[in-house]
């Protein structure tokens, strides 16, 4: 009998989810190529039906509209006292769920950036911090899988900045990414009469947080993964290669090839995607769904440039001059079934958003294809964080403060509404951090403002999610 170690467990869980998602890929590609991917999914074709205001099970608050049969709990509100005695930080963003000794461990980002370093801004009080003048970081929520309530919660990373998205690894860690390149240099914006920077440490990095940690430790940035305006990452479990997105326009799609698989801190090589024989290819408009584009990768010589604090595209430009492709605001990123799916929030002819699929090749550099482009903002607007459900559909959080939804995309390429925000409307909120529990029965998602985590469950098999 093979002994199942902690590392093996996480690796197998990732492969299982990817294999399930793979079942719908061929049908998805065929439909996308035919131009029918803009159809809405109704009940019986992947959707779950109309949404209705629904009270939460544990508090009675009406925070969301959901399809009939679905329920949710309200968890981890901003300002609520955590088990470690600290108030829950604001600005809930991306997260991932991990299995741990009969409980669910949810590692959650907090996208906090006041623009300028402040003494003792770090969350977690006197907890070990990378930079005591920076207010971002992560918290960990230990969840009872039966009650879907918090058992305990605590700060797990302190002193980072503007922690937007990230991604889980097959070896049981959460990579949290800084969406800024501010650092120790204090700069002044004369037009706005504001100062920026002046932190104790430089920022714009990725940090790796152990999912099973029971408290904060000082965690150092992985500088070889680049200093730029990070968004999300996804890890290919077969190779340990980490794929990274950049939330700028123009932006690039990156990969980090570690020297030691599973040990990112050992360093590695950072590269940017380019389309073969089409230098500086612009993906932002004029693309056709389903068309395969062969890719190559160009090396980034200086992943941690000294001028990143004043030029946030310093890494990007290194790739661009070598012919790297251009995207519009790359955000969410997720591995499933041998592919990396990632969103271009402002991409497309109508700027309503694109979803791209990169498929690595066993030999060669793989292919890129436009998986979905929204033709109308009422169908999908500004796709941001995404994940693939264990049943093969895509869950997509919209970065749209005026009418935020969680949308579903079926294995056949059809779109449907799954959740509509009610609690965050007055706060110009957005959904973020969609992720399923290890058993696939609970979907966790955040409303960034006012800062709420939801645990959602229901008849998943009635639709694509």
Image (spheres, rainbow, N blue to C red):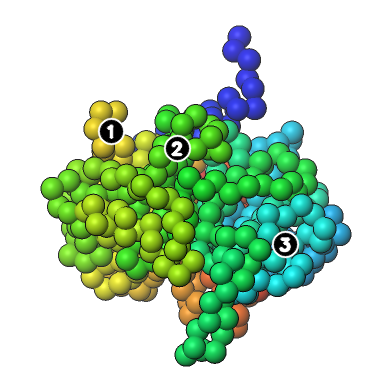
Dot 2 alpha-carbon crowd within 10 angstroms: few under 14, some 14 to 19, many 20 or more: some
Quarter of the image where one finds residue 321: bottom left
- The quadrant of the picture occupied by the N terminus is top right
Q: CA distance from mark 2 to mark 3?
A: 28 Å
Say which of 292 and 312 sits in front: 312
Give percent across and percent down for residue 412. Answer: 31, 49
Q: Is residue 116 left or right of residue 43?
A: right
> What residue would you read off at disc 3?
132
Q: Which mark is residue 268?
A: 2
Q: CA distance from mark 3 to mark 1?
A: 43 Å
Q: Secondary structure at mark 1?
A: loop
Q: CA distance from mark 1 to mark 2?
A: 20 Å
Q: Is residue 357 left or right of residue 150?
A: left
Quarter of the image where one finds residue 78: bottom right
**Reading the chain from its start, which is encountered first: label 1 or label 2?**
2
Residue displayed at 31% across by 37% down: 360
Does residue 92 lie above or below 339 as drawn? below
């Amino acid at each position: 009998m093979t002994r199942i170690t902690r590392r093996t467990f996480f690796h197998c869980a990732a492969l299982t989810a990817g294999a399930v998602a793979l079942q719908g890929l061929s049908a998805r590609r065929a439909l996308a190529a035919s131009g029918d991917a803009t159809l809405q999914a109704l009940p019986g074709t992947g959707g779950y039906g109309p949404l209705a205001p629904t009270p939460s099970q544990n508090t009675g608050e009406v925070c969301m509209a959901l399809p009939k049969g679905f329920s949710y709990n309200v968890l981890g509100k901003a300002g609520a006292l955590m088990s470690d005695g600290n108030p829950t930080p604001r600005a809930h963003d991306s997260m991932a769920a991990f299995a741990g000794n009969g409980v669910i461990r949810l590692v959650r980002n907090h996208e906090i950036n006041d623009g300028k370093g402040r003494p003792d801004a770090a969350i977690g009080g006197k907890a070990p911090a990378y930079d005591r003048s920076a207010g971002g970081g992560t918290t960990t929520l230990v969840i009872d899988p039966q009650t879907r309530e918090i058992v305990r919660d605590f700060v797990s990373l302190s002193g980072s900045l503007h922690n937007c998205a990230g991604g889980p690894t097959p070896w049981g860690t959460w990579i949290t990414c800084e969406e800024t390149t501010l650092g120790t240099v204090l700069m002044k914006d004369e037009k706005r009469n504001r100062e920026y920077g002046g932190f104790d440490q430089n920022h714009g990095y990725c940090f790796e947080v152990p999912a099973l940690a029971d408290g904060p430790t000082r965690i150092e940035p992985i500088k070889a993964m680049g200093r730029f305006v990070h968004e999300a990452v996804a890890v290919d479990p077969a190779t340990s290669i980490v794929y990274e997105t950049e939330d700028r326009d123009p932006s690039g799609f990156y990969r980090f090839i570690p020297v030691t698989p599973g040990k990112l801190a050992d360093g590695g090589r950072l590269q940017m995607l380019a389309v073969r024989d089409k230098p500086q290819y612009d993906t932002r408009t004029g693309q056709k769904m389903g068309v395969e584009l062969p890719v190559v990768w160009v090396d980034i010589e200086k992943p941690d440039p000294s001028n990143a604090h004043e030029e946030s595209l310093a890494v990007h430009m290194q790739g661009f001059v070598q012919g790297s492709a251009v995207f519009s605001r790359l955000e969410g990123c997720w591995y499933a079934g041998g592919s990396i799916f990632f969103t271009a929030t402002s991409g497309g002819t109508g700027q309503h958003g694109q979803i791209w699929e990169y498929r690595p090749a066993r030999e060669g550099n793989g292919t890129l294809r436009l998986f979905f482009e929204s033709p109308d903002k009422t169908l999908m607007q500004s796709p941001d964080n995404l994940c693939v459900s264990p049943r093969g559909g895509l869950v997509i959080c919209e970065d749209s403060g005026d009418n935020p939804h969680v949308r579903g995309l079926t294995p056949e390429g059809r779109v449907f509404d799954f959740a509509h925000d009610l609690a965050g409307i007055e706060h110009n909120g957005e959904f973020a951090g969609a992720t399923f529990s290890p058993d696939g029965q609970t979907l966790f998602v955040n409303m960034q403002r006012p800062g709420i985590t939801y645990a959602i469950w229901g008849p998943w098999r009635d639709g694509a999610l």
